[in-house]
Image (spheres, helix red, strand yellow):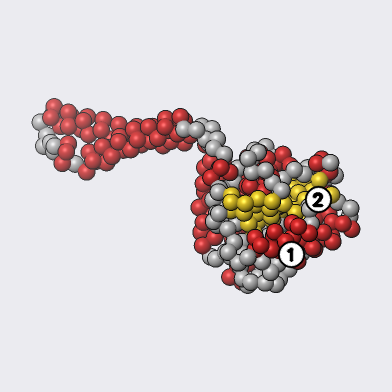
């Protein structure tokens, strides 16, 4: 029964050594707790033979289904397609590098089904990562907590559990997978929990993420903060700044005209308005104000609800109807 099924979504990029070991580990852990499950592997354009390995795994285990992208689109794209393909009432995400432990899955499922959480995020309290990753990560999580108002210690942990309607309601793209709890909260899913999870040392290969992920992460955080507040009312944002700058320009213009009239009336020395720096400041403010108004009008008319899953070119699939 789909209502008693756990869907495990695994985004994967060049993890040929680990994917077989991971699926076997999942099978062992979930079989002990007698949990019905499916595994959805999304190959994000791997070029190391991962897809061939996945083919072999699907032949051995009918619970495994898979998608393959034509090229590397990123983790958010892989998760989005995996979410759309999931059929269980609880959806678990984990990385394919064996650093997330499937032994945590039964308790995460219980927290969703019995404790009533919409989303439970893993917290890698003790990490097996170099300081070049842990220190920026702490700063990143602190800033995200302050801005989002969600008291999580590890927003970027790959091991998370979701109620099905959460993942079916959200749309992630770019590198916004780090902010799924924030996006879920904006969609009205407020019961967000956290669980301390084991973090394993990387067994194969090297990390696929560099320092640029933190730069991109902060830019995405700014983008999400803007969208969550003004997506449905962009004129409130652009119009507010438009009014401020337009009226500032109007006040400066009025002052310049009044000053000239006053000095002419009392036969005082008068400078041409165009010779004064304030004139150009007023002119810029008026133009910028009008442009902001126009930006607000255009934003109000633009269609916001694009389904980005159609942007990803899936070349092959196993057990998944990509036309659904």
Residue 29 versus residue 77 in the image, above or below: below
Image location (x, y in percent) of residue 75: 60, 55
The residue shown at (43%, 36%) is 238
Name the image quarter holding residue 247.
top left
Q: Could you tell me residue 112's position as x and y percent?
A: 80, 46
The residue tagged with tag 2: helix, strand or loop?
strand
Give the residue at x 78% y 53%. Answer: 62
Q: Circle 2: is it few (<14), some (14-19), or many (20+) Cα within 10 Å?
A: many
Q: Which residue is mark 2?
A: 37
Q: Quadrant of residue 143?
A: bottom right
Does residue 44 appear anywhere in the picture?
yes
Question: Of residues 34 and 170, which is closer to you in this image?
Answer: 34
Q: Earlier in the sequence, mark 2 or mark 1?
A: 1
Residue 74 is situated, as x and y percent measured from the top left of the image, at 57, 55
For the N terminus, which image quadrant?
Answer: top right
Taking the image as shown, residue 80 lies to the left or right of residue 239, namely right
Residue under label 1, please give it. Answer: 20
Q: As rendered, which of 152 and 215 lies closer to the eye?
A: 215
SS at circle 1: helix
Q: Is residue 129 left or right of residue 236?
A: right
Residue at the spot 65% in from the left edge and 70% down from the top edge: 129
What residue sits 80% from the left and 63% below the top?
A: 25
Q: Quadrant of the C terminus?
A: top right
Q: Is residue 118 visible?
A: no
Figure label count: 2
């Amino acid at each position: 029964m789909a209502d008693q099924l756990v869907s495990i979504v695994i985004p994967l990029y060049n993890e040929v050594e680990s994917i077989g070991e991971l699926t076997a580990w999942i099978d062992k852990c979930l079989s002990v707790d007698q949990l019905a499950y499916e595994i959805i592997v999304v190959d994000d354009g791997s070029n190391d033979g991962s897809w061939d390995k996945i083919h072999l795994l699907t032949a051995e285990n009918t619970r495994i289904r898979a998608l393959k992208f034509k090229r590397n689109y990123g983790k958010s794209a892989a998760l989005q397609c995996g979410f759309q393909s999931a059929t269980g009432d609880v959806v678990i995400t984990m990385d394919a590098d064996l650093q997330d432990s499937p032994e945590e899955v039964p308790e995460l499922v219980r927290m969703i089904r019995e404790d009533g959480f919409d989303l439970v995020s893993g917290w890698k309290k003790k990490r097996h990562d170099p300081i070049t990753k842990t220190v920026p990560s702490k700063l990143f999580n602190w800033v995200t907590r302050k801005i989002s108002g969600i008291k999580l210690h590890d927003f970027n942990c790959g091991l998370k559990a979701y109620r099905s309607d959460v993942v079916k309601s959200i749309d992630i793209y770019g590198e916004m997978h780090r902010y799924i709890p924030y996006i879920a909260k904006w969609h009205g899913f407020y019961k967000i929990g956290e669980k301390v999870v084991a973090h394993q040392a990387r067994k194969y290969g090297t990390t696929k993420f560099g320092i640029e992920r933190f730069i991109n992460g902060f830019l995405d955080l700014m983008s999400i903060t803007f969208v969550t507040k003004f997506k449905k009312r962009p004129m409130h944002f652009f119009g507010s700044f438009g009014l401020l700058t337009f009226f500032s320009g109007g006040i400066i213009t009025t002052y310049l005209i009044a000053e000239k009239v006053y000095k002419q009336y009392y036969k005082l020395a008068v400078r041409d308005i165009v010779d004064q720096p304030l004139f150009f400041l007023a002119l810029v403010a008026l133009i910028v104000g009008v442009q902001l108004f126009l930006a607000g009008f255009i934003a109000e008319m633009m269609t916001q609800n694009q389904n980005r899953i159609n942007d990803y070119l899936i070349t092959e699939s196993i057990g998944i109807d990509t036309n659904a």
